[in-house]
Amino acid sequence: MAEVVLFSIIDRILGKLGNLALQMIGRMLGVNDELDKLRNKVSIIKAIFLDVEELQTKSHEVRDWLHKLKDIVYDTEDLLDDFLM
């Protein structure tokens, strides 16, 4: 269940990174390249997440990594929310 929530949050992050207002702010601040890199990394994380989801039941290391990934995803969404306010 938590994985479904995380996947949903990753989709929201990607949506926020594609937000026109964020792109305009990024241009004004000169951070468009960094936003593009972040968008690309979040997209990669989403793809990796699909593979890792199956492995987490078999490996404590993967489960630990997934837990850390969840923390990063939540922090990223909070950061984008703060930036867009």
Image: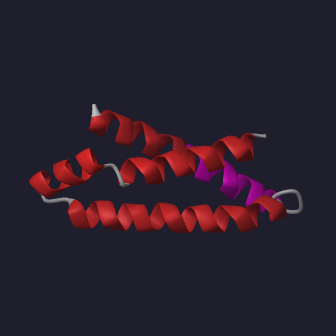
In the image, 57 versus 2, the foreground residue is 2
53 relative position to 72: left or right: right
Q: Which residues are magenta?
A: 60-72
**Is 3 situated above or below 54?**
above
Query: Which quarter of the image is occupied by the N terminus?
Result: top right
The residue under the point 54% across, 68% down is 44
* Image quadrant assignment for residue 53: bottom right
Q: Is residue 72 visible?
A: no
62 relative position to 47: left or right: right
The residue under the point 67% across, 57% down is 65
Magenta stretch: includes residue 67? yes
Residue 3 rendering spot, x and y as whole percentages: 72, 47
Query: Which quarter of the image is occupied by the C terminus?
Result: top left
Magenta stretch: includes residue 47? no
Q: Is residue 25 visible?
A: yes
29 relative position to 57: left or right: left
Outermost residue to the right? 58
Secondary structure mostly seen in magenta is helix
Outermost residue to the front? 20
